[in-house]
Amino acid sequence: MDAAAGGQQVPRGVLVLLCPLVVLNAAFIAHHFISPSLQYEGGGGWALQAAQEAEAVASIACSGHGQVFQDGVAGEGGRPVGDPLFMEPYWRRHAAASAVVLPGWHRMSYLTTDSLFQSVELENQIRRLHSAVGNAVVDGKHLVFGTGSTQLINALVHALSSYLSPDATLPPVTVVATAPYYPQYRSQTTMFGGRKYRWGGNTALWANATARRSFIEFVTSPNNPDTLLQKPVLGGSSAIVDHAYYWPHITHIPAPADEDVMLFTMSKLSGHAGSRFGWALIRDENVARRAYEYVQNSSLGASQDTQLRMLRIVKVILANLRGEEDMLAFGHDVLRTRWRRLSDIVSRSRRISLQEIHPQYCTYFNRVREPSPAYAWVKCEREEDGDCYQALLRAKIITRSGVGNEATSRYTRMSLLKSDDDFDVLMERVTDLVDAEKCDAPRVSSM
Amino acid sequence: MDAAAGGQQVPRGVLVLLCPLVVLNAAFIAHHFISPSLQYEGGGGWALQAAQEAEAVASIACSGHGQVFQDGVAGEGGRPVGDPLFMEPYWRRHAAASAVVLPGWHRMSYLTTDSLFQSVELENQIRRLHSAVGNAVVDGKHLVFGTGSTQLINALVHALSSYLSPDATLPPVTVVATAPYYPQYRSQTTMFGGRKYRWGGNTALWANATARRSFIEFVTSPNNPDTLLQKPVLGGSSAIVDHAYYWPHITHIPAPADEDVMLFTMSKLSGHAGSRFGWALIRDENVARRAYEYVQNSSLGASQDTQLRMLRIVKVILANLRGEEDMLAFGHDVLRTRWRRLSDIVSRSRRISLQEIHPQYCTYFNRVREPSPAYAWVKCEREEDGDCYQALLRAKIITRSGVGNEATSRYTRMSLLKSDDDFDVLMERVTDLVDAEKCDAPRVSSM
């Protein structure tokens, strides 16, 4: 996730100020009108009451620029930053189709009706989705659910290293990624690493490694943070290919991915980051079994509440694919418009630049599509802006420094997945930053 | 969780046979009547549709002896075994008050409105609950949520061992528990253990350990499997006290627990095992911070969908405490009735025996209460029944062998938390087993 992004605190602060009455109303509804002491002794109507409550709270929307949650506590800063909220308008439009109702007696078991930790029906729908979108080959693959793809990062390292380093006499497996890489691979492998596997850093360090050493290589494609499609670089390594962003609203799809171990997440597909739901597609049965056992041992599976909700979400996505209300077309529209706006502004700048992305043919849309990356990978061009994150922060633009990705501090990541309001504020501030260049003294060194 | 328990497969199989039409109906509803392609363009009524659907599915209840889930796939064995479904009738009675509605746009963020991975409002309600029940002191404690208390097992080992063994030159911390203990402590510590901590087995092995060795001791109180209240036995160890069962429907509460590190879970409090929600109460700020970071690093928090649902559940419990619809009184009634039924049958047996539990004063009920344990810790008394699990299995009673608890195979655990139907079948089979003793030849060795 993106813990830091473009300047949302001011508009949210304003929204909170505009909506105090609304927060009070929600609290009133939550504590009095729909008090838990109201009990229906079975029979019809129980779900309607919950539904009416949800609608009452949902209708309090601060003119569409904020929202009140059922457990909202009036805070200082308002909403958090950096979330993939760009999909929220789509789900507001599809509120009926996408809603689930969970009465207290529902889903109490550890297991699904199939006596598994994961829903077979949800697995079937996910397989259908991959096949219909054409972004991954599911035949001959095993599917393992996790509490977000985050939980599966270490589940897969664990599963593969049990295979690569089956006994204690062998050296630990070295876990690597090519910089700039997603920092969670490092932080999680460092936290969990021990006898069987250890974090080894950038693949560049291991280009001449001896053949006897075993590697697990994380490959994110499209990459987080720089959004380029990637392949493993260490020959003979076991690759975990993180396809979190390999969906046609975020990237072109040249062909279905078919690697041995692949990671996906709802966070970036539908924007449901808070649900914590991800899955792995794994060719080898033993690796899949070990990953499933890891999830079972560390958390007894992913939340059944969430699995039920994700089933509904995936069904809505599937039912609308290639239709007028295609979620992927919606997402692509949002992101390509954002990228175009940002690119237009930055094209006037000599101070900051963005990664280059070209329009490419996409098998899903069956045409050449405009770029729509999840992130801008910003480079500060001026010599004195060696810490690009700090340079942008002075312009009230919050990004995530490239240092965390093992890139240099000259780079920083800007999320384009945020809410519409937050993105508008980001654009205002980037425009101010670029406009201010005209006022700067001309710089000899860059002539 | 209890992966094996008393003989549910036959009755559930029968239910599946009785309800094929019902499963078809649910599938029809899911795929046609409430197809995801139905879209409401905002406005009123979206939640009502979802609610009507949930009620339609919920009303298909196989005369109260089974249920159809919205993502149900007709399976062979029917419902899984060993779940804490004893609370389901309570939540069916309180369907209205306990229901939550989650439209697609709700809770998409990684974070709550307070920019945290965990809901402050849910934390407040949990603190209120502990104070009102009187089973734990929350003042001066930090609260950390997890994907079940299961995720927090290793989160706490990680957090404490960072403290006990801060650098690599120190020997690993030894993680122990007193047999019979909950096997997940061993399986998880063995899976994650490495440089900083290692599984050390039964505390009995370490009674004479040198003072230089650091220990983390798991203490489950009441204990799983034998349901007795427990204290740490190794002086000077850091204890993680698992109070999963320290609620007045399952045990008497002599006083509020006030250990430095305590674990709780919704699975055993309300029966919502599938939601995967647990929490730790931690006195030391640094230990709490490390545990919170562990959860963040390994899964980016617990599901927000589940947090919202648990908020509602806790509010219902709180609103009814000590009233006519007290969930804890309901749970106690169910479990004490079950214990009495089982004890009555087993009292006629010379082949199997149960742990002894006496009525004790409980501060919550403000009276001496009858025993209501979550598990029967069954001992096979005959010499030839050295493998008690197998002996019961031959009578079609599925239990969990004491071997997993590092007890001898002469013991086995029988869950009393299952559904009413499953418990009835269990009682039938235990009755058959005991009645069959009369037909056995008198045994000289036991005279």
Image (tube, coloured by chain):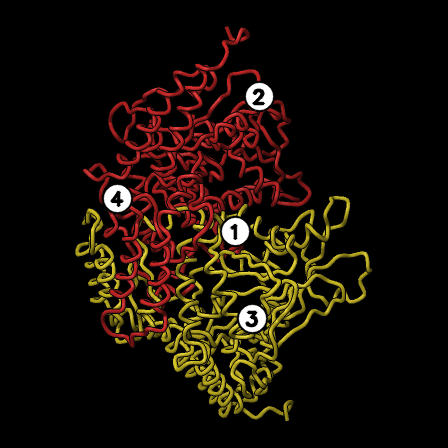
Chain colours: A yellow, B red
Is A135 drawn above or below residue B94 in the view shown?
below
Q: Residue A401 carries which label?
A: 3
Q: Which of B181 and B350 is in front in this view?
A: B350
Please, what secondary structure does the residue beneath circle 3 have?
A: strand
Q: Which chain carries label 3?
A: A
Earlier along the polypeptide chain: callout 4 or callout 2? Answer: 4
Q: Residue at x 27, y 57 (%)?
A: B55
The quadrant in which residue B25 appears is bottom left
A196 relative position to B133: left or right? right
Q: Which amino acid does label 4 sit on?
A: Leu
How much space separates mark 1 and mark 2, taking CA atoms? 42 Å
**Pointers 4 and 2 within a single chain:** yes
Q: Tell me the residue that label 1 is attached to.
A: B294
Q: Which chain carries label 4?
A: B
Earlier along the polypeptide chain: callout 1 or callout 2? Answer: 1
How much space separates mark 1 and mark 4, taking CA atoms? 30 Å
Closest to the camera, between mark 3 and mark 4, is 4
Q: Tell me the residue that label 4 is attached to.
A: B318
Q: Tell me the residue that label 2 is attached to.
A: B386
Q: Work out whether residue A45 can be spotted.
A: yes
How much space separates mark 4 and mark 2, taking CA atoms? 46 Å
Callout 3 touching callout 4 (CB < 8 Å): no
Report crowding for label 1: few under 14, some 14 to 19, many 20 or more residues within 10 A (C-alpha).
Answer: many
